[in-house]
Image (cartoon, rainbow, N blue to C red):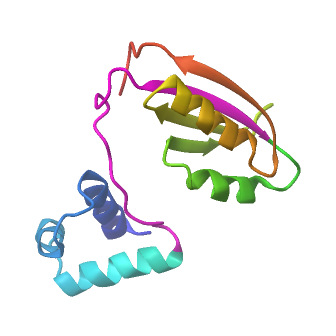
Amino acid sequence: MDDLDRKLVALLRTDGRMPVTTLARQLGVSRATVNSRVERLLESGKVLGFTVRMREDHGDDDVRAITLIEVEGRTTNDVIKALRGLAEIQSLHTTNGGWDLVAEVRCDSLLDFDRVLGRIRAVDGVINSETSLLLNSVLRS
């Protein structure tokens, strides 16, 4: 990725639906350049796709948690693929140490959370997990 690609990605992170003409104008390039750059970033796998960002305060009663996940052997990629399909997982990270993955989970209720936790634990390759509910956010970036 060059400087233009990084600027393009930064704009798309701000607004993934920004029109190509607006992107081109802000970057000082043609619409064709923007289109070809986006296509190349998608084809190369550097950009995986576009998504919806939700307001953080959309549900004050939401159940939020951090789930630490241990994966069996070399199944990490398969587990990640399965977990990406769970809409309740807000973010998923690989990590070092005793755990292989860290997932941030958000659900509407404890009943929904229990169901999602069961689905996480049922994924082939998941051998252990530990979850901490997030009670109150005292600092956010």
Closest to the observer, 75 or 64? 64
Closest to the observer, 57 or 44? 57
Q: Is residue 136 visible?
A: yes
Q: Is residue 133 left or right of residue 79?
A: left
Residue 35 x/y as whole percent: 28, 82
Residue 56 x/y as whole percent: 32, 32
Closest to the observer, 1 or 53? 53
Q: Which quadrant: the N terminus? A: bottom left
Q: Is residue 57 left or right of residue 48?
A: left
Residue beneath the point at 32% across and 27% down: 59
Residue beneath the point at 47% across and 33% down: 106
Q: Main secondary structure of the magenta part?
A: loop
Residue 13 x/y as whole percent: 31, 54
When asked about the image quadrant of residue 27, the answer is: bottom left
Residue 112 on the magenta span: no
Range covered by the magenta-colored residues: 45-70
Q: Is residue 101 visible?
A: no
Residue beneath the point at 57% across and 44% down: 92
Q: Which quadrant: the C terminus? A: top left
